[in-house]
Amino acid sequence: MRRSDVSSSEPATIPGLEAFAAPSADAASGAPRRGPSPEELLEGLNPPQRAAVTHSGPPLLVVAGAGSGKTRVLTRRIAWLISQRGAHPGSILAITFTNKAAAEMKERVEDLVGRRARVMWVSTFHSACVRILRKEIVNLGYKSNFSIYDAADQKRLMGLVCQDLDLDPRSYQPAQILNWVSDQKNELRDVEEAAKEAENGVEEIYAKAYATYQRRLREANALDFDDLIMTTVHLFREFPVVRETYRRRFRHVLVDEYQDTNHAQYALVHELCSQPMEDTDDRPGEQRVPPAELMVVGDADQSIYAFRGANIRNILDFEQDFPDATSILLEQNYRSTQTILTAANAVITHNQGRKEKRLWSEQGDGERIVGYVADDEHDEARFVSDQVDKLVDAGHKPSEVAVFYRTNAQSRVFEEVFIRTGQPYKVVGGVRFYERREVRDALAYLRALLNPDDQVSLRRIVNTPKRGIGDRAIACVTAYAETEGVTFWESLRRAEHAPGLATRSLSCIRGFVGLMDELQSMVAAGERADVVLESVLDKSGYLVELEESDDPQDATRVENLAELVAVAREFSDDPVAGPSADPADVDAGQVQPGLRDFLERVALVADSDQIPEDDDGVVTLMTLHTAKGLEFPMVFLTGLEDGVFPHARALGDTRELEEERRLAYVGVTRAQERLFISRALVRSAWGAPSHNPESRFVGELPVDLVDWRRTEADRTRWSRPDLSHSPAERRGSTGFGSITGAGRRNFTSAAMRADAASKAQRSREIPSLTPGDRVTHNSFGLGTVVTVEGQGEKAVASIDFGSQGVKRLLLRYAPVEKL
Ligand code: ATP
Ligand code: MG
């Protein structure tokens, strides 16, 4: 990954945040530090960048292409506000796209202006809203210890809602309903409004599900991810006094990647920064404050989150939304060679209705783009791996290399080839650490301890590990909770009154309640997150069960839990880490981050937070979406096939195609020195080979920029991929001996997947299933088939495994048996 271009010795993983060549902070001595001079703060900036940093007054929009220093300008501006304009750091709210970017930005500003910068709020929209809601949500009738539900919790809850409403699982899938609900929330439509605006019968049912889902969330004292923003906006609108508190507090609001804000986020910025309306009910006798100074930076050509409600119009209409706004255009790119920029410009010009901008670079033409047409995806992965070897032989570090692909599933072949060659690699955003079962179980314990009303978490762990509280016992307790109108937790406590409960179950439930009480007293005593977590794993018997198991996967699970404890320990040791700690208290050294802060941090980690920091030996693999905002000297853009990238879904839809093209623009502009593009003539999707034509984006590149090392005409052989064995087997022994570091960590699962797949392929018939069938699965246990799509080798079933959730399985591979 890119090293800083100035004097810092630290890697600047998020570009634009390089440490600054100012006199070093004398933090060690604790002596007050001389603030940087204006010249120092503006050093290394071009005139429009300087204008943006020093701008004062009306809202400011910095629109500029990739790599033109938007993030750098935003960071410098914060330092400028604090050191030159006397802004109190506590009056600054800066929004970044990931938590990692936030942490780094904060660090850079601290490098510039010293420790006092710590009280700034630099965070994602979600984290900022959590902080506000923890303080203020009591106004809306929630308790301030609300839980935050992530995607998996949401699915489980929506599953329950669908049962409540008796919805036919063939027509109404929780994931689909959730998408719709998410759209409503991003558009700030509450339950009533959604019901009013429902346009057809299906939407009316969705609106009903939305209402029940919200009711259940409220009962569990929980908010989902989209609620965080919507609820904050509603809170501000319903309680102008609360809003005024934050308007007074935040005198400066700065937003990076503004092109990817959705309507709710836009409305939040508006609440904080628009001119006050006349008819709001302010604090009597107090003067209204003028609006905060607002700066947003972004690039409409990099808007790639429309599917999550991002609205490109937010940036295009900025000048209308804020009539006195000023705009600054940055046109010099400092990241890439002219060849890479010309390629990026050539592609993006094919989008209609965009503002033309011409990026230029002083870095010279650099090398031509290297192109390769592969026989199949394995051949493509081999090409990438060979090129990485060559680059390393030529003196580059593997960490300077990134491999991008359109969808997560494409990482597998690259993983296999890197495992074979012993090249350490890291997949960012693949099977995410926090989505692994054991990690989720452990976190469910912690959440239930903090908020026993959180019944999704509580139900997840009540019999995990197995402690004799079976489905029947749970049904008795649930029924009792319903008749008595008490929570699930309360009902567990009073289980002796629950009709129909067997004595054995009752004593198991008592054991569980005793365990939770004991653990809860640790939480109440303010014990550190890592200590609580270790006690949970120990006292619940969870760890012992895994340790005693013969299943090699359980050994990996133990490692993952050890890693989670390490994460909690690192977090507890860092006194400024807690996102919900009050900045003033933190500054006074009063608050140790607690369990709640830890859970919040965990709930808010995004994909790109996993990017390795200073491991020189690791190649990074990630999807194009995750690559936003980053830069790498060497970039491989793979899978450039129509149907893969652009995605098949986008082929017939101009709007989606334009979004894919912006994604291509993002991908190309991550590269600093070298760009490699590749595609495969045949690619196996869902186990069946498909032949995809060249991506139209390749056709949009000027021909003279690309040096094709192999073309379609050059191919020497073409054969259908042999599907009877796993790819690893087809290529003979794997020779894992030399794997180190991150590569090793991924090895087990990749190898096991390949192995399991090949075994399954050789020996099993594909079960023929229909909705309603009962099945067993080697890992997930008993389940009920919800839907089946496709036939034969392509048949995919969604199966509800109860507490394990609903899984989509390719039946050809899945170890599923019909009962
Ligand atoms: P993106 O659109 O990808 O988010 P960006 O506009 O935010 O890009 P930055 O990441 O801030 O751009 O900057 C791109 C690179 O150029 C960084 O490595 C940054 O340090 C460098 N850079 C920016 N401005 C200058 C400058 N005036 N002189 C030298 N280098 C610069
Ligand atoms: Mg940026």
Image (cartoon, rainbow, N blue to C red):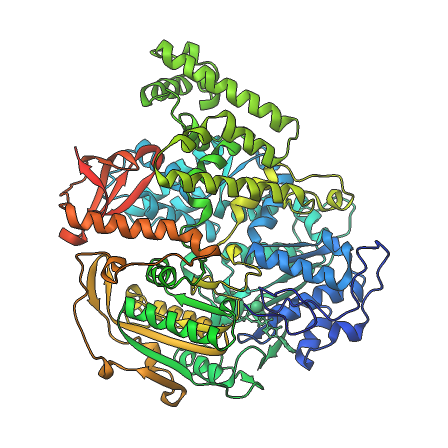
Q: Nearer the viewer, residue 482 or 79?
A: 79
Q: Is residue 55 visible?
A: no
Residue 151 x, y percent position in the rendering? 42, 45
Q: Residue at x 39, y 56 (%)?
A: 737
Would residue 522 be seen by someone viewing this image from the given angle?
A: yes
Q: Residue at x 39, y 18 (%)?
A: 477
User: Can you say which quadrant of the picture contains the N terminus?
Assistant: bottom right
Please provide percent x and percent y for residue 306: 42, 62
Identified at 79% across, 61% down, the residue is 25
Q: Is residue 258 left or right of residue 109?
A: left
**Looking at the image, in which quadrant does ligand 1 appear?**
bottom right
Relative side of 320 to 674, left or right: right
Seen as rendered, the residue at the extreme bottom is: 704
Position above or below: 719 against 189 = below
Q: Is residue 441 left or right of residue 209?
A: right
Height in image: 99 above or below 23?
Answer: above
599 or 441, which is in the foreground?
441
Q: Quadrant of the C terminus?
A: top left
